[in-house]
Amino acid sequence: MLSLSAWLESSLYAESGYYNNPARVGKEGDFYTSVSVSRFFGAGIANYILKLLESNALRPPLHIIEIGAHKGFLLKDIADFLRALGKDSLFSQLHFCTIEPLAQLQEAQRATLKNLRNFCVHNSLQSLESTLKPNEQSLFFISNELLDSLCVDIFMHDSMFFINGDCGLWVESKRQNLTLAQKDLLFTLKKLNLNGAYPPSLKPFLTQIAQCARKSQSAYFLTFDYDKLGARNPSSFIRAYKNHQVFSFEEIQNLGFNAFYQTADMTADVDFEFVAYLFKNLQFLQVFNKAQNKVLLEECALFEVVESFEKSCDFSLYQKEVAKLRALLDPQILGERFRGVCFCYNAPL
């Protein structure tokens, strides 16, 4: 019998796991993200970074770090637009890196970003931290649909969801030999009176972000993902993407977990209120939590970028790229639940 998080770890991240095949993500794969829709997604983030630099919220030298970069296309778009929108003197003070534990994806990222100077791949946040010099650089972390890929366990009061062979079952958590991270998570959820799908690795992950931030002049963490927005029904928290179909938690159980092992992406919605609670205890402040279209329009001033793009490129290319914007900005497509959430490190006095 395995906890759900242990089963997901093997299914998604083992040597033959789902995420070890880069072809599974993108328009030709089982699902795609905003990165695949339009380069203006990266352009908007680049413009937000420039605004933080202009306001001195961030100061060069600046490390721009993508976590969960897949093939590296988002970071390339951010770098290309920073080069186009900024100044050469600024761009020379920018350093780019990805955090990627999977060897095949490391190779894909190096291939995508091979022409980008000052680029490197780290296999962990600890590796990044070891390269940082205290108070000599600013940090900007970016991730897209990363937190929903962390392996979750599902808790309902005193019970926890396990997988036995091909079937799922609920077991009293106090009767199980849980990991320290699971025990810590369960204690926090009980304290906050929360039930549902939560990753035991979330707090250690955010703690590693904070450890890097403590060695910086200033640090920001921006992420995009699906938010629970108050939903508390565990059947809606985990889903599978396979062969261009979406399967609910109930459908996964009916079909059997073996039907999805290492052949499907399995994700859970993110409780950003819980993320904010954990980050607050690590001296981070929430900058904003908005629907993605509002982040791109209000925080990233995307129309400023679009106007600049119109003046500097072929009109037919401009029309082609602008036509893609609807998928990023139309609230009917992604809805309010797909959020952009940003935190900044507030160093204690």
Image (cartoon, grey):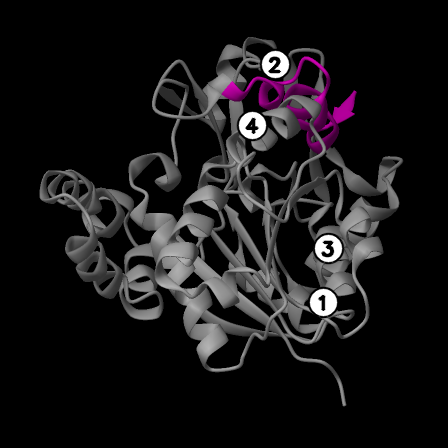
Q: Is residue 8 magenta?
A: yes
Badge 4 is on which residue? 111
Residue 335 percent location from the top left of the image? 28, 50
The correct choice, above or below, for 240 with respect to 82 in the image is above
Q: Which residues are magenta?
A: 1-22
Q: Is residue 120 magenta?
A: no
In the figure, residue 167 lies in which quadrant? top right
Between label 3 and label 1, give the one nearer the viewer: 1
First in residue order: circle 3 vs circle 1: 3
Horizontal side of residue 149 vs 50, given as left or right: right
The Cα atoms of the two marked residues, 4 and 3, are separated by 32 Å
Estimate how packed mark 4 is, as few (under 14), some (14 to 19) or many (20 or more) residues with alpha carbons within 10 Å: few
First in residue order: circle 2 vs circle 4: 4
First in residue order: circle 4 vs circle 1: 4
Amino acid type of the residue that numbered disc 2 sits on in the rendered structure = Tyr
Amino acid type of the residue that numbered disc 4 sits on in the rendered structure = Ala
Q: Secondary structure at mark 4?
A: helix
Amino acid type of the residue that numbered disc 3 sits on in the rendered structure = Lys
